[in-house]
Image: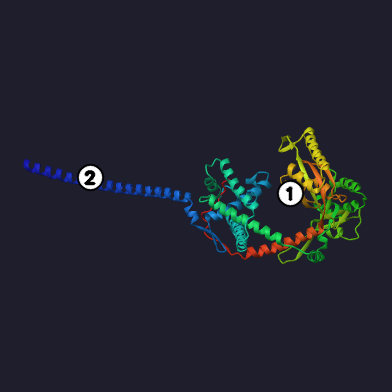
């Protein structure tokens, strides 16, 4: 090959190699361009997602979505998520508060026993295995019922022109003010932020005020309707005719012998009945308690004795003993034993009765509760000082003596004056430490046996020997009370109970019909917080 030919061949090869290189570079440039476009697109997508998330978060926190999402309807009312969240959150919090109290502040453990794991969303946990209802469903339905109750009452109140009293309006303002106090206590710089943290985004003072006002008006109308119900003597007698025993009270001692306490299961019934018969051979409560302690099943137990029941209403007496105790021929000291039985039904509806033991009962007394209710006035002189230990405040003898001296001074001041009921009332307004009755001259009416007053106060007030104008100084855990007996009420305790029963029955019927007539339904509840945030 000539030199020129070789030169020409090298040029052609170099040219071919250049072209191949250029082609490879072109491919690399295209690939790089593709990567660049994809990367730019990815960045754009990420940026869009970030912007959307940011905007979405801002919108969500603003409460706009919650305020524009209808969570439930009640009658003609549409409740958005914010409005319904007040009912929902209160239902959840009240439930947890009750659980916490029942478990000595061990909420999580109690919740687990109830089948709820507080670490998981409520709508992911089953409340009712048969229906598939979740815990969220359970809380939602309770909240819906509460909302229906409020709005049913509010609609009636508005239709009849019922408004809050001055005291009720003041109580409402205090409730709202208390929320502001909590906001400061927990470090929030505004009430709106605190409410949003408790009830969810969108909650603020205006919406909370509307909710609280509705609830207050509903309660006010309910109470007003209840107070408007009056009954004549004929109404009481007509009801009493078919429920006479319900308003009698019985005092008795009782002791239960359970078959399960006997080791010999085959002879348990025989042994229990033999022990029951042995106990009925006693003639006094002391003998009864000694015989109980001497039983073989109690030899390794301490302080085993009968239980004393005093002035128990017939409806609250053990069903095992109701018929025997209410026998009109029953006499003090009568004693017997009665079978304790349970009844169950199988799938076919057939009943089976099972003996679980014997109930030994000793009759002490009974009353028809025809004593009149008592009306008193009092002046409370509270103990001052004291030392608190384990949550209990203990007062020294000197501190108690100081309070007693002041109480006796007030009583003497009254005696040295006009010594009338009116003058006592004025003295109470000026000096009593009992804020509940002070403005009313220390007046407390309709006191009955078993009322929830401290023992000394109650016993003094219902003493059958008490006469109008009687005075005294008595001690209670709160201090010393200067007592003044106004007199017997016109109504007896028995009629008081009958009237309250009639009123309760009528209110339940009225309220149930009113609420059940209110249409209600859940809508979009997805924006409610269904997780524990305690």
Q: Nearer the viewer, residue 23 or 62?
A: 62
Question: Looking at the image, which residue is at 80% across and 33% down?
Answer: 397
Q: Are marks 1 and 2 in contact (CB under 8 Å)?
A: no
Q: Position of residue 532 (x, y in %)?
A: 57, 48
Q: Position of residue 499 (x, y in %)?
A: 77, 60
Q: Position of residue 513 (x, y in %)?
A: 66, 65
Farthest front residue in view: 418
Query: If the image is split into quadrants, where does the N terminus sit?
Result: top left
Which residue does the numbered mark 2 point to in the structure image? 25
Q: CA distance from mark 1 to mark 2?
A: 102 Å
Label 1, secondary structure: give it: helix
Query: What is the quadrant of residue 225 in the picture?
Result: bottom right
Q: Nearer the viewer, residue 27 or 417?
A: 417
Mark 1 vs 2, N-terminal side: 2
Q: Residues within 10 Å of mark 2 (few under 14, many from 20)?
A: few
Query: If the image is split into quadrants, where does the C terminus sit?
Result: top right
Question: Looking at the image, which residue is at 65% across and 44% down?
Answer: 106
Label 2, secondary structure: give it: helix
Question: Looking at the image, which residue is at 79% across and 46% down?
Answer: 423
Question: Looking at the image, which residue is at 55% across and 55% down?
Answer: 83
Query: Which numbered disc covers residue 440?
Result: 1
Q: Is residue 526 visible?
A: yes
């Amino acid at each position: 090959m000539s030199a020129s030919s070789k030169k020409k061949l090298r040029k052609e090869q170099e040219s071919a190699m250049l072209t191949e290189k250029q082609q490879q570079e072109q491919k690399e440039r295209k690939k790089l361009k593709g990567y660049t476009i994809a990367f730019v697109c990815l960045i754009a997508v990420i940026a869009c997602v970030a912007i959307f998330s940011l905007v979405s978060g801002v919108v969500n926190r603003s409460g706009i979505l919650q305020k524009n999402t209808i969570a439930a309807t009640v009658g003609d009312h549409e409740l958005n998520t914010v409005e319904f969240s007040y009912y929902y959150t209160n239902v959840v919090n009240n439930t947890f508060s009750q659980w916490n109290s029942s478990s000595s502040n061990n909420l999580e453990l109690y919740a687990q026993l109830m089948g709820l794991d507080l670490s998981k969303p409520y709508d992911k946990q089953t409340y009712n295995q048969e229906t598939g209802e979740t815990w969220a469903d359970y809380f939602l339905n309770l909240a819906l019922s509460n909302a229906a109750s409020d709005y049913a009452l509010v609609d009636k109140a508005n239709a009849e022109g019922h408004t809050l009293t001055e005291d009720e309006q003041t109580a409402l303002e205090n409730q709202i003010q208390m929320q502001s106090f909590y906001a400061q206590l927990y470090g929030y710089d505004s009430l709106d932020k605190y409410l949003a943290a408790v009830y969810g985004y969108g909650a603020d003072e205006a919406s909370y005020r509307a909710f609280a006002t509705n609830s207050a008006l509903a309660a006010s109308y309910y109470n007003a309707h209840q107070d408007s119900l009056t009954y004549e003597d004929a109404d009481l007698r007509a009801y009493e005719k078919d429920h006479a025993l319900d308003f009698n009270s019985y005092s008795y001692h009782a002791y239960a012998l359970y078959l399960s306490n006997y080791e010999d299961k085959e002879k348990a019934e025989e042994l229990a009945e033999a022990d029951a018969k042995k106990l009925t051979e006693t003639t006094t409560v002391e003998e009864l308690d000694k015989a109980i302690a001497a039983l073989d099943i109690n030899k390794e137990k301490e302080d085993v004795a009968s239980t004393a029941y005093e002035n128990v209403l017939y409806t609250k007496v053990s069903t095992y003993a109701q018929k025997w105790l209410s026998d009109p021929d029953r006499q003090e000291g009568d004693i017997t034993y009665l079978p304790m039985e349970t009844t169950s039904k199988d799938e076919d509806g057939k009943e089976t009765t099972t003996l679980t033991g014997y109930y030994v009962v000793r009759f002490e007394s009974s009353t028809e509760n025809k004593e009149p209710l008592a009306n008193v006035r009092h002046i409370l002189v509270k103990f001052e000082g004291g030392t608190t230990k384990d949550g209990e405040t203990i007062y020294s003898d000197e501190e108690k003596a100081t309070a007693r001296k002041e109480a006796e001074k007030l009583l003497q001041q009254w005696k040295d004056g006009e010594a009338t009921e009116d003058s006592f009332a004025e003295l109470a307004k000026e000096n009593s430490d009992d804020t509940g009755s002070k403005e009313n001259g220390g007046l407390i009416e309709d006191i009955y046996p078993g009322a929830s007053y401290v023992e000394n106060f109650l016993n003094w007030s219902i003493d059958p020997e008490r006469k109008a104008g009687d005075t005294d100084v008595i001690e209670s855990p709160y201090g010393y009370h200067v007592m003044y007996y106004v007199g017997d009420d016109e109504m007896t305790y028995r009629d008081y109970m009958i009237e309250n029963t009639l009123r309760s029955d009528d209110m339940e019927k009225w309220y149930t019909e009113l609420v059940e007539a209110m249409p209600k339904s859940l809508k979009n509840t997805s924006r409610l917080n269904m997780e524990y945030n305690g």
